[in-house]
Amino acid sequence: MSQSTEHKNPKLIVVAAFDRGEDGELFPAFGPADQQSEDRAIRTARALAAKHVGVIAWSRDADPTLGDYGPPTTLFVSGDVPDME
């Protein structure tokens, strides 16, 4: 069996949108919401960008059974978003 046909770990794909409170601090206005695909996450994030101060879509390789998560990859970002930890 070649490596390309082996089972790949699923991806965690998420979109989150942020607004600013009266104190000027960012707060979550939408999500983080799981998405079915990176394309869908980007489309969702673009749609939310018109309505919120900041939007981010990101993905990371995930193996929830092991609690193993790879580094996040930013798919789309618009406006002000908090630093990802």
Image (cartoon, rainbow, N blue to C red):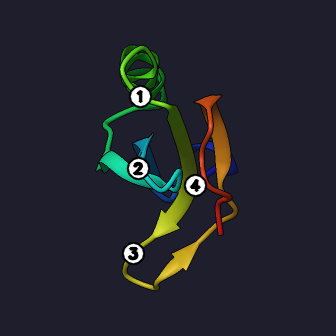
Q: Is residue 25 above or below residue 75?
A: below
Identify residue type, mark 2: Glu
**Residue position for label 4:** 60
Residue 3 showing in the rendered view: yes
Q: Amino acid at mark 4?
A: Arg
**Label 1: which residue?**
52
Please name the amino acid that badge 3 sits on. Pro
User: In the depicted view, which residue is nearer to us: 29 or 33?
Assistant: 29
Is the C-beta separation of discs 4 and 3 under 8 Å?
no
Residue 18 x, y percent position in the rendering: 43, 43
**What residue does disc 3 label?**
64
Disc 4 to disc 2, how far (Cα)?
Answer: 33 Å
Q: Nearer the viewer, mark 3 or mark 1?
A: 1
Pinpoint residue 42: horizontal percent, then vertical percent: 48, 23
Name of the residue lying farthest toward the front: 22
**Comparing labels 2 and 1, the label whose residue is closer to the camera:** 2
At label 1, the amino acid type is: His
User: Which residue position is annotated with label 2?
Assistant: 22
User: Who's the residue at 53% across and 50% down the image?
Assistant: 24
**Of 45 and 75, the residue lying toward us:** 45
- Residue 48 x, y percent position in the rendering: 37, 23
Q: Nearer the viewer, mark 4 or mark 2?
A: 2
Q: Secondary structure at mark 1?
A: loop
Q: Is residue 48 left or right of residue 74?
A: left
